[in-house]
Image: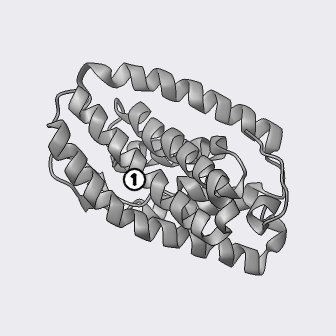
Amino acid sequence: MHIPDGFLGWTWPIFWIIAIIAVAYSLKWARDNLDERNVPLLAVLAAGIFAIQAMNIPIPWGTSGHMVGAALIAILFVSPWAAVLVLSIVLILQGLIFGDGGMTALGANIVNMGLIGGFVGFYSYKALKGVGRIPAIFIAGWASIFIAAIACAIELAIAGTFPLTEGLIFMGLYHAVIGIIEGIITVVVILGIERVRPDLIPDWVKGKKQETVG
């Protein structure tokens, strides 16, 4: 899903502007909500996301498919802005150090994986948690990566990089399958953390009433 340089044509500055605004909001969230108790968890999860994103599956016409982790962060930290923050850090490091994703396309990558992935994952879980937390977590993980992939295909079609129909088919099919793995991993990680450190799991994941930190 990392878009390389040169694939967004004239549109890349638009995504940079959106990404800068989103990162600013995520930094405000961090100042208001992060403390010495949850910073280590955020750092560990960021490192894990960095690692899982290294497993890329090539997709025709220049992009790639991989897991993202945005829903996991958004659910555990009760805010989509946490996902924006973590994914921004991960994507900046990947682009600067490993050349994974272009720097002109960094704004779009942050928008797709951090902003769209985080918000879709967060609100999917919020809407579905009444039917059961495990199905809700799974669907949130799946939807976060699938919708982000669809957005990526649309963006590349607008830029004229490749046709919309083919883009939706390839990005959609690949990430519909990858999303199953994403959903399973999201469930496993949350349940694993709950088993060893239940104090780090927010009440809304435990099934208790919890206010939303938007």
Query: Which residue lies under the disc numbered 1?
Result: 146
Badge 1 crowding class, 10 Å Cα cut-off, few under 14, some 14 to 19, many 20 or more, is many
Which secondary structure, mark 1? helix
Quarter holding residue 14: top left
**Which percent across, then down, holds residue 118?**
56, 46
Q: Is residue 62 left or right of residue 70?
A: left
Q: How many marks?
A: 1
Quarter holding residue 58: bottom left
Above or below — where is 7 with respect to 165?
A: above
Quarter holding residue 153: top left
| Point 81% across, 73% down: residue | 198
| Point 64% across, 63% down: residue | 44
Farthest residue to the front: give it.
131
Q: Is residue 97 left or right of residue 63?
A: right
* Nearer-the-camera pick, 197 or 204: 204
Q: Is residue 155 left or right of residue 67?
A: left
Q: How is the image coloured?
A: one colour
| Point 17% across, 42% down: residue | 165
Q: Is residue 41 visible?
A: yes
